Every structure is written in C-alpha cells, then in structure tokens.
C-alpha cells in the first residue's frame, strides 16, 4: 500500500511537471508566433480600415487581397524575387563545395601546419563582419564588380563556422573506416562523396537551409554594393517599396510584401525541419 502511494505521488509530480512545461511552452509559442499573425492580419486589412483603427483589432471581418496584388504591381517584386533566387542558389552551391573540401582537408588529411591554419581560421570568427565589409567593398569596387551578381556572391562563398561544424561531423566518423577504404584503393574524393557525405547528410541539409536563409535575408552587403534596381534583392527591395512603391503610410501593403517574401523560407523550414533538428543535434554531439 505504501509503495502504491509513493508511485501515485510520483505520477502526480510527473503530470504536474508536464502540465507546467506544456503551459509555459504554449505561452512562449504564442509570444513567438504573434508577430507572424499580426503581419498576416495587417496584410489582409484595407488601407482605410487599418488607419481607422484607433485601437488595434486582432481580427478582421472584411479581409482583402488587394494588398497582395499591389505588391506585384506597384513595384517590380517579381524581379526582386528572381534576383534573390539567383543570388541564393549560386552562393549556397559554391559555398557548399568550398566548405565540403575544406572540412574534409582539416578532418582527414595530414599536412604541415594543419592545426595552426585551423586555429587561424577559427580566429577569423572573432572579427566582426562590419570590419570586413569595408575591405570587401573596396576590393569589389576596384575590380569593377559593383552592380553585378559576381560582386554580390563572391564575399559570401565561404564560412568559417560551417567549415568548423562540418569538420566536427566528419571527425565523428571512425578513422578505421577511412583506413579500410584506403586499403581497398578508394581515393579521397570517392571516400568523401560515397561515405562521409551520406553519413553527414543531416548536417549538410542544415547548413544548406541556414545559408539559404542567410542569403535570402541579406541586407547590408547588397544595399552597399548595388544601387541599380536591376540587381536589387527582396531585402533591400523592401526599402525601395517603402520609399517609392507604397509609401511610408501604407502599412498593410508593406505587410503583404513582407508576407510574400517570408513564405518561401517558412515553407522551406517546415519541409526540412526534421533534418535541421537532426543536423543541429549531431553537430552538438561528440564521439
């Protein structure tokens, strides 16, 4: 009888703990998701309805999609999308090739000064991007690459953090597997693509998605290196929309443009969320 009472108290404590955990997680989810809800809600309100609300309303009985039509007609939002897609795909593809070979070299190959070079690589993470931007701007300008996709892409084709993350994953693969492959006459390149890459696929997917998000949201560098509307991305295109498209007062139309721009990233994350979580957890595990 005493054992049953102890077990019941333990179950009640566990149930209470779970209830409190889910309660606070629900509150946190509402806080995180509310800005997205407000963004979508505002985009569905007409300009007059939005401005007539002295006290903001958390609902609307007369939703309209006119703001979304305006988003593609008042400004060349389709062109901004195309430019961003080109920039994102090209930058991500080149970066994946660069970090893949760099991480493999640091993880599996032996060459003089490897640890020193890698330490210097890690030291670069301590330098704020704002300090590097000036050097990149001068270099790209001297090369005559302003207002070109090459100028947009070049400074973003590598990442020390992603090299480090992928190297840590590569090092979790047993050395015996590499030695056995070498005994069988497998080349380093074949071992990389046939063995290491499939094993570390979740991490590669995670890096790809994070880089896509980074490129899609890139603002400072595109704004600095391009002043030709033909090369505007969606991020700095938003500023153009605000200044020359809808105007500073038309908040619903601005929100509609932001929703349109945000949807691809949200869909991408929802599709690959499991692989992202697996890649992050694998990157944080050693051994």
Image (tube, helix red, strand yellow):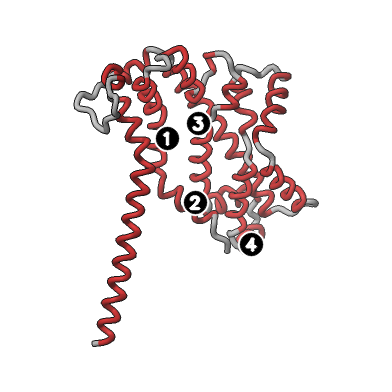
The answer to whether the residue labelled 1 contacts the one labelled 3, judged by CB atoms less than 8 Å apart, is yes
Image height check: is 152 above or below 35? above
Assign a secondary structure to mark 4. Answer: helix
Q: Nearer the viewer, mark 2 or mark 1?
A: 1
Residue 279 shows which numbered tag?
2
Nearer to us in this view, 101 or 194: 101
The answer to whether the residue labelled 3 contacts the one labelled 2, judged by CB atoms less than 8 Å apart, is no
Q: Position of residue 100 (x, y in %)?
A: 61, 44
Residue at 48%, 16% in the rendered image: 240
Residue at 69%, 51% in the rendered image: 106
Q: Nearer the viewer, mark 1 or mark 4?
A: 1
What is the spatial separation of the Cα atoms under label 1 and label 3, in whole angstroms?
10 Å
Q: Nearer the viewer, mark 3 or mark 4?
A: 3
Q: Position of residue 115 (x, y in %)?
A: 75, 53
Q: Residue furthest bottom?
A: 1
Which residue is identified by label 4? Answer: 175
Which circle's residue, 3 or 4, is located before the other in the chain? 4
Pick the quarter of the image with the C terminus.
Answer: bottom right
Structural crowding at the residue carrying mark 4, measured as other residues with C-alpha within 10 Å and reported as few (<14), some (14–19) or many (≥20)? few
Which circle's residue, 3 or 2, is located before the other in the chain? 3
Q: Nearer the viewer, mark 2 or mark 4?
A: 2
Q: Is residue 40 visible?
A: yes
What is the spatial separation of the Cα atoms under label 1 and label 4, in whole angstroms?
37 Å
Which circle's residue, 1 or 3, is located before the other in the chain? 3
Image height check: is 273 above or below 282? above
Q: Is residue 89 visible?
A: no
Residue 217 shows which numbered tag?
3
Q: Nearer the viewer, mark 3 or mark 2?
A: 3
Structural crowding at the residue carrying mark 2, measured as other residues with C-alpha within 10 Å and reported as few (<14), some (14–19) or many (≥20)? many
Image height check: is 248 above or below 283? above
Q: Position of residue 131 (x, y in %)?
A: 69, 33
């Amino acid at each position: 009888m005493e054992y049953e009472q102890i077990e019941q108290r333990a179950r009640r404590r566990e149930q209470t703990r779970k209830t409190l955990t889910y309660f606070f997680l629900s509150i946190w989810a509402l806080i995180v998701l509310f800005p997205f809800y407000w963004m979508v809600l505002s985009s569905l309100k007409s300009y007059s309805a939005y401005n007539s609300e002295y006290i903001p309303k958390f609902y609307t009985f007369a939703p309209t999609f006119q703001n979304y039509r305006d988003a593609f007609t008042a400004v060349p939002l389709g062109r901004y999308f195309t430019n961003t897609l080109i920039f994102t795909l090209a930058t991500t593809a080149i970066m994946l090739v660069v970090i893949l070979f760099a991480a493999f070299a640091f993880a599996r190959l032996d060459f003089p000064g490897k640890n020193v070079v890698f330490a210097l690589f890690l030291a670069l993470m301590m330098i704020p991007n704002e300090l590097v931007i000036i050097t990149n701007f001068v270099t790209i300008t001297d090369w005559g690459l302003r207002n070109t996709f090459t100028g947009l892409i070049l400074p973003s084709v590598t990442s020390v953090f992603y090299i480090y993350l992928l190297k840590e994953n590569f090092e979790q693969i047993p050395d015996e597997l590499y030695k056995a492959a070498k005994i069988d006459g497998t080349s380093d390149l074949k071992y990389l693509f046939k063995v290491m890459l499939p094993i570390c696929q979740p991490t590669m997917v995670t890096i790809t998605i994070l880089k896509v998000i980074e490129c899609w949201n890139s603002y400072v560098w595109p704004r600095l290196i391009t002043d030709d509307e033909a090369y505007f991305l969606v991020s700095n295109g938003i500023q153009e929309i605000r200044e020359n498209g809808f105007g500073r007062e038309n908040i619903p139309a601005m929100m509609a443009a932001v929703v349109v721009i945000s949807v691809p990233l949200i869909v991408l994350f929802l599709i690959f969320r499991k692989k992202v979580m697996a890649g992050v957890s694998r990157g944080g595990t050693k051994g």
